[in-house]
């Protein structure tokens, strides 16, 4: 049988010192060790609660009464908490008053990670999250194949599936409110140029679609289109005259405020239209959207931003939108272009009519 005692220098604790399930010995001056008869170290197995009783097991540290807690009735383990059932974790809950977590530490020539398996030889360790000390990279694998890699310099690469599905599929499951997708943000620079790209799509043959840092877009075949099949449309009729609308729209030159803020007197003049002026003529091609922080910086009429000293809620930071006062107007230029095409057709018809009349006069 096994006994409870001290490491060599202490007397063996006898069963007479066990009272109400508690082992006491006022003379213990060193760590307690569990040994088997005749040995100075533990050779046999140690089993706690072999009868599977509904009893908890708890280990205290200097500052935490539940440094290790085994919930015997619910089959859960808590580290730093005596109530692992208060959380959503299945088996292990780690709780800390400060910065909690689990550290996996390996030497500089090895890798450490979390490996997941279902116990069968065919699926053992087929999915894992692993950190490689040699390359200072983090990888995520499924089906025993690396799917995602974060390199030491922060570059993130993903392996696309072989069945044609998207490599990146973002689902926003908000049931209400404004849904949002992917956003690219340069937090320390404003590279308003053609030197680099905010988005680029390439293959082994050529670059197919490019979005430059200044927002200009290019594609390989110079083709921008819309789904226009007759079978997805109904109530198809000829468009009304666009002559008066196109004639009334003012084409303007202007300088953008954000360009002035970045380039000063070197900001260039652009040609286009002004949304409020177009709205008075063609209100249906005007779109409205919530302002971005950059919009609010250009005009306080759009809203306010959080500043130093504000009571900033969780999830927000200095420079984020605090209040929206007005939406930003934009123009559906694709619709405007089609209106211009219709007006051009009308002008062509009038020109052809005039040409016919002139020819008739000339032939008379």
Image (cartoon, rainbow, N blue to C red):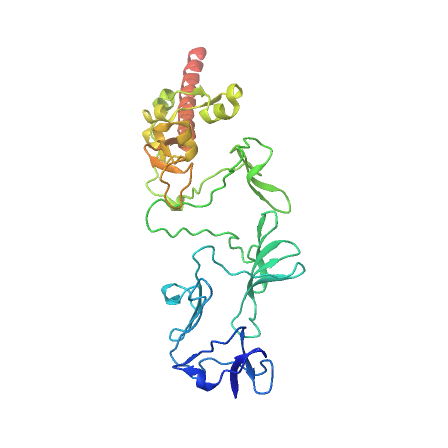
Q: Nearer the viewer, residue 27 or 219?
A: 27
Which of the 4 image quarters holds residue 230? Answer: top left
Residue 318 visible? The answer is yes
| Residue visible at 54% across and 73% down in the picture | 31
Residue 120 falls left or right of residue 284: right
Give the x, y percent position of residue 4. 51, 81
Residue 91 falls left or right of residue 286: right
Q: Nearer the viewer, residue 26 or 201?
A: 26
> Please, is residue 90 above or below residue 200 in the view?
below
Which of the 4 image quarters holds residue 300? Answer: top left
Residue 268 visible? The answer is no
Give the x, y percent position of residue 72. 40, 75
Q: Nearer the viewer, residue 128 or 171?
A: 128
- Residue lying furthest bottom: 1
| Residue visible at 54% across and 31% down in the picture | 192
| Residue visible at 40% across and 42% down in the picture | 316
Q: Nearer the viewer, residue 351 or 262?
A: 262
């Amino acid at each position: 049988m096994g006994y409870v005692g001290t490491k060599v220098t202490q007397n063996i604790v006898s069963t007479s010192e066990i009272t109400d399930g508690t082992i006491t010995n006022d003379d213990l001056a060193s760590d307690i060790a569990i040994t088997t008869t005749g040995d100075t170290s533990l050779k046999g197995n140690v089993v706690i609660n072999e009868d599977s009783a509904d009893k908890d097991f708890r280990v205290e540290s200097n500052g935490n009464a539940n440094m290790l807690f085994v919930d015997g009735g619910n089959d859960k383990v808590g580290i730093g908490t005596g109530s692992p059932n208060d959380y959503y974790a299945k088996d292990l809950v780690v709780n800390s008053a400060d910065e909690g977590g689990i550290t996996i530490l390996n030497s500089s020539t090895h890798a450490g990670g979390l490996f997941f398996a279902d116990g069968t030889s065919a699926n053992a360790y087929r999915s894992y999250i692993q950190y490689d000390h040699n390359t200072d990279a983090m990888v995520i694998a499924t089906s025993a194949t690396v799917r995602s890699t974060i390199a030491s310099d922060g570059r993130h690469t993903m392996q696309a599936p072989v069945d044609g599905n998207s490599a990146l599929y973002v689902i926003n499951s908000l049931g209400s409110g404004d849904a949002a997708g992917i956003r690219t943000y340069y937090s320390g620079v404003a590279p308003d140029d053609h030197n680099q790209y905010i988005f680029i799509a390439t293959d082994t043959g050529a670059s197919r679609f490019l979005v430059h840092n200044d927002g200009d877009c290019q594609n390989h075949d110079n083709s921008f289109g819309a789904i226009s099949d007759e079978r997805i449309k109904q109530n198809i009729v000829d468009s009304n005259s666009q002559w008066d609308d196109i004639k009334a729209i003012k084409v303007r030159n202007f300088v953008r405020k954000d360009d002035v803020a970045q380039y000063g007197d070197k900001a260039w003049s652009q040609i286009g239209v002004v949304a409020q002026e177009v709205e008075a003529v063609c209100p249906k091609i005007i779109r409205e959207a919530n302002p971005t922080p950059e919009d609010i910086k250009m005009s306080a009429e759009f809203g306010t931003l959080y500043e130093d000293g504000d009571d900033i809620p969780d999830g927000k930071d200095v420079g984020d939108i605090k209040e929206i006062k007005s939406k930003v107007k934009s123009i559906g230029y694709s619709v405007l272009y089609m209106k211009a095409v219709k007006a051009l057709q009308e002008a062509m018809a009038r020109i052809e009519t005039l040409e016919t009349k002139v020819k008739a006069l000339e032939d008379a």
